[in-house]
Structures are given as structure tokens and as C-alpha cells.
Amino acid sequence: MLSSASRLSLIRGRAAAAITASRSMSLSAYDEYGKHVFKGDVAEKYLSAQGASAAVLDDPSWTATHADEVAAGVLEWALDNGATSYAHWFQPMAASGVRHGLTGQVQNMMMKFDDKGNLVKDFKGKNLIKGETDGSSFPNGGLRATHTAGGYLAVDTSSPIFLRGDVVFIPSAFVSYHGHALDEKTPVLRSNEALSKEGKRLLALLGHETEGIVANIGLEQEIFLVARDEFYRRPDLQLTGRTIIGRDAPRGQEMCDHYMAPLSSATPALACMQEIQEECWKLGIPLKTRHREVAPNQFEFAPLFGINTAQIDQNVMVMQIIEEVAARHGLAALLQEKPFNNINGSGKHNNWSLGTKEGVFILEPDDINEATGNESAFGVIMAAIVAAVDQHGDLMRAAISSPGNDFRLGACEAPPAITSTYLGGDMTAYLEALKNGATGAYKPTKKTLDLGTSAVLPFDVPAEDRNRTSPFPYGGARFEFRAVGSAQNVSLVNTVLNTITASKFKEFADAIEAGASPHDVAAGALEKHWRVIF
């Protein structure tokens, strides 16, 4: 059996070898991007052979009109990539921090054997679009009556099918016999419908006709990576996700020497992060950013933003991949929000933005004002969101509540547990003027920094500085829900954000349709809910 020193030496050797290999590969890792997700050019190749095209996947009705063609294409794609099983992949309610991967699945062969023992392909449209299983133990073992035990799975067409290893995963909604949600996904999908419906109404009243509204998110995933042999010496860390006995770490983060420092090859962390990214790229997960975070052994990944349902699914898989790849590098990945006392915990910043299906950014002032031909449109929309945050701050707080996150909030740079929003000086002044009767477009001031050296030309910076303390600051075309916990499935978070916003959009639209002016509705809401701006 290897000693701790020998194991560490072996791990470091593997890390160095992995880095050398990655350098020699150059851009080859990117050649694999999206190979294991059934969309775009990948889907086109296999669907065209079935007399269809990847375009059919853009219309949810393919489940009724092209299910067999899509299933046939998926089957051939799976076999070409070494996959022979499939699973309807769902997200059981309240699984955050409880189960590895946060998901549920039953893996079935895509083959069968005939009477002569010959292998026969067995994957049709009916297998793809729907599944059924025993749902009596969801959301927990004992809450539901076992005489109403059906659990029904239906493919979520808003999130692409993907494969990993020998299994094709089909993102699915999971409901009871009576249609009650047993999962995290179904409420998000319902909230998307409400947001689109009421947002479409409000934008029409402000001057812009659209097919609907979509919510885009980007999720910044913070983690700790620690030596696995040391992790096994801490039963508290293994069983609870955090240290609950013993002294504080002898070295903290006072020098801030870990934050954004070089990712050194002296430990396995860099090789581990590289492998995580490469696995994610194959699944079409655009995990773009990696860096050290503030606390010792704390790191962060961040992807490009996208449609909320697909981003949530991808983040759930990212967390699973992080844990599994870390083990291969002699590391333990700690996703819990506050594993160590007196140093920073880990969050998952939920950057939330709204756009029309045609591509207009609703939270970008120039974009939405131009689309509507209404210079006050942006102010009206912002007033609705401010009102939603004030009236439903308790729901936002509940959506981020967990034992781990409640230890994190309010300390060591984490946002406070009291819900508020920060808009910056220019935005706050603009909305205050709107509240007091002023009209006109939001025009943030421009700031240029001149460093006093010819080697660096003067450059522009945003009108507002970053606010790392606010739970829900506006950051230019998006709000950043910074109080979200790192171990969470963020479905509930985004269900709440969508629903409270849809509720206010409806309230504003109802008032405007009843004869009130958009300006007066917005001003009244700001007057009533101004206290939440902090």
C-alpha cells in the first residue's frame, strides 16, 4: 500500500503528464465539442438519414409528428458513439445536497433478443418520448401513499438529449398520475410559460409585439478541491459536508494569495479542471472560465449563458462530472456551501436575464427602448422587477435556503440573508426621478479611466462598480442572484424569479389595459416598493 507521500508524488506526476499532453493536443480538445449532444450538425447528420432534419427539434410538436424519426436518429448516433442504453433523466424534488448527481434515472437497453438469440435494435418513438416508473418514494420515502405510486416521464424538448459513457440521457419532466410535479424541472417549465405569456402582454402594451419571452441564465459554480486521503480522515466532512469539530484551519485567506493566482501544476487541481472542461465540452456544455477563488483550495467554473432549462440541466451534470473527475485525480470535490469555518463559502451566482424569442434583450435599456419605440419601456420593466423583489422577497429567500447555505450567508463576503436589490447610483437616480414624475430614457453616465501612462490608453468602464454584497444586484442587462448556494439545483430559484416577475408583469398589464398610463403604473409601484433598493 502506498504511503501518503508516495500517493502525492504519483498524483503530481500524473498531473504534470496530463498538462504536457494537453499542450501537445493544441486545439484538438475543441474538436470534440458537442459530439455527445443531439442537436445542430450532430443531429442533422442522423436525422437527414431518416428523411428529417435537425430543424424539427426546434418545434416541441416533434414528439407527435416525428418521434419515430428522431428515435431512429438517436439510436444510430448512440451506437456510433458506443452507447447501448437510454434513460429518462429527471431531477427529483428536494434532491439538492442529498444525492450524487441530483438526478434520477432507470437505464434500459436499446436492444432486445429475438427467439433465436439474435440481437435486435429496440428503440422507437414511444420509448423516447415517454416513460413510467414507480414514483412512490418521491419526493421522499414515505410522504406519498403507495397506492397512488405512478411516476410518469415525458421528454423536455427545451433541453437537448445527450450521451455519456454507454447511456443516452433524455431530459424529462416527472409527474404523478394526477399531473402533480414530483421534480424540479416541471415547475420551471410552467414558470417559463407564465413569464412568456405575461411578458408578451406587457411588451405589446409598451409598443413591441413578440412571440414570447425567454429567461436566460449563466451559473458560476464555486467548489473546493481537497486531497482525497485527507478528506477520508474527516468523518464530519464526509457525512455532513462541513467540518463541525476541531480547530479552524491554521492558514486562512487574509493574504488573498489564492484568489486568481496561477493554476499551478504542483497539485492535481489544474489537470483535474482541464479534464472536467473536456468532458463538459463533449456534452455541449460551454464551460468557458476556470480560476482560483478566494479561499484556499477554492475554485470556480463558469459557462456561457443560455436558455434556463438547458443551463440548469447542464449545471446538474457539471456538478456530477466535477465529483467524479476529482476522484480520478486523488481529490475530493466539496460542493457544500460552507465546508470550512472562518473562510469563504461557495455560491452559485445565478445571472438571470430576459429576452424576446426574436433576440431583443429586455433588461438592456437601449435594446428594449428601440424595439418598443418607447423611451420609458426599460424603466417600466425595471419597476415591475423591483416591485416583485420587494413583495416576494420571502420566496426568494426560501428558494436559496439550505443548511449549508444558511451557514454561508452574511459572512466572509457572502451576501446577507435579507433580500434586497442594488441598482447602482445612476439607475437608482433614474428610477427615483421616474417615481417623482420625470419621463425619458435611462442614460447612464460614461466613465473613462486614464492611468497616466502612454503604455495604457484611456479606457471606458461601466457606469456602476460591482457590488459583491447585494443578494440581487443589477449588473447591466442582467440581475445576479448572488445568494444562491453552490450545491443547489437552481430550478426552484429560477421558478421563483420567473413567477414573481410574471405576476408583476400581469399586474402592470392589467392596470394599463384598464386605462392607466405605463408611467403612472411604474411610478406607483416604485413609490410602494422603494424600500427594497439598498
Image (cartoon, helix red, strand yellow):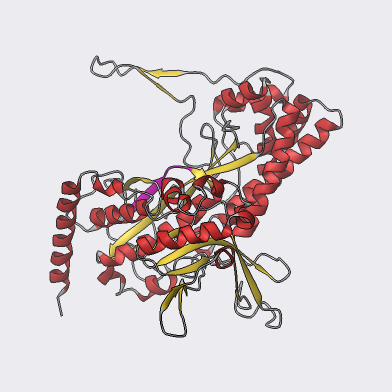
Residue at the (28%, 15%) spot, across then down: 452
Between residue 48 and residue 204, name the one nearer to us.
48
Q: Position of residue 37 (x, y in %)?
A: 43, 54
Check the image and name the residue furthest to the right.
514
Question: In the image, is 141 to the left or to the right of 26?
Answer: right
Q: Is residue 177 above or below residue 380?
A: below
Residue at the (63%, 19%) spot, across then down: 441
Q: Position of residue 49 (x, y in %)?
A: 45, 53
Between residue 494 and residue 485, name the one nearer to us.
494
Residue at the (46%, 59%) spot, across then down: 74
Q: Main secondary structure of the magenta part?
A: strand
Which region shows up in magenta? 299-305
Choose top left, top right, bottom left or bottom right for residue 325.
Answer: bottom left
Between residue 348 and residue 191, name the one nearer to us.
191
Question: In the image, is 383 to the left or to the right of 168?
Answer: right
Q: Position of residue 437 (x, y in %)?
A: 74, 20
Residue 417 drawn in magenta: no
- Residue 212 in sight from this viewpoint: yes
